[in-house]
Image: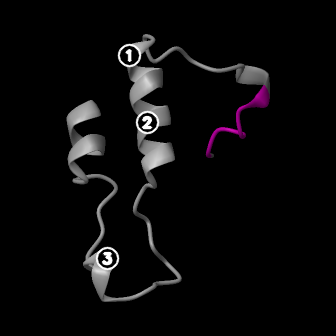
Amino acid sequence: MRDAVTSGYRPPWHADGPHGTFGNDRRLSDLEQSTIVRWIDAGARKGDEKKAPPKPV
């Protein structure tokens, strides 16, 4: 997961960034990437399950 996030492989994105601004841009910012990597490095612990969205039916 760390490799996919830091390499830019995930989340998938079909457009190359320097060529415009897109309303459906799913790329991660540097801050979002570093937050995910810190979470992974800390053991990728689950959050408070009471705050989780409902499970899909």
Which residue is the site of mark 1?
41
Mark 3 or mark 2, earlier in chain: 3
Given contact means CB atoms under 8 Å apart, are the residues at marks 1 and 3 in contact? no
What is the secondary structure assignment of the residue under circle 3?
Answer: helix
Q: Quadrant of residue 53?
A: top right
| Residue depicted at 50% across the width and 45% down the height | 31
Residue 12 on image: x %, y %: 29, 62
Question: Which residue is at the far bottom?
Answer: 20
Q: Gap between marks 3 and 2, in whole Å?
A: 19 Å
- Dot 3 amino acid type: Gly
Task: Check residue 55 for magenta coloring.
Answer: yes
Residue 19 on image: x %, y %: 30, 88
| Residue depicted at 71% across the width and 21% down the height | 49
Mark 1 or mark 3, earlier in chain: 3
Q: Is residue 35 above or below residue 18?
A: above
Give the main secondary structure, helix, strand or loop, of the magenta stretch.
Answer: loop
Q: Gap between marks 2 and 1, in whole Å?
A: 10 Å
Q: Quadrant of the N terminus?
A: top left
- Dot 2 amino acid type: Ser
Mark 2 or mark 1, earlier in chain: 2
What residue range appears in magenta? Answer: 51-56
Residue mark closest to the camera, 2 vs 1: 2
Residue 55 on image: x %, y %: 64, 38
Residues packed near mark 3 inside 10 Å, few (<14), some (14 to 19) or many (20 plus): few
Residue 38 on image: x %, y %: 44, 24
Which residue is the site of mark 2?
34
Which residue is the site of mark 3?
17
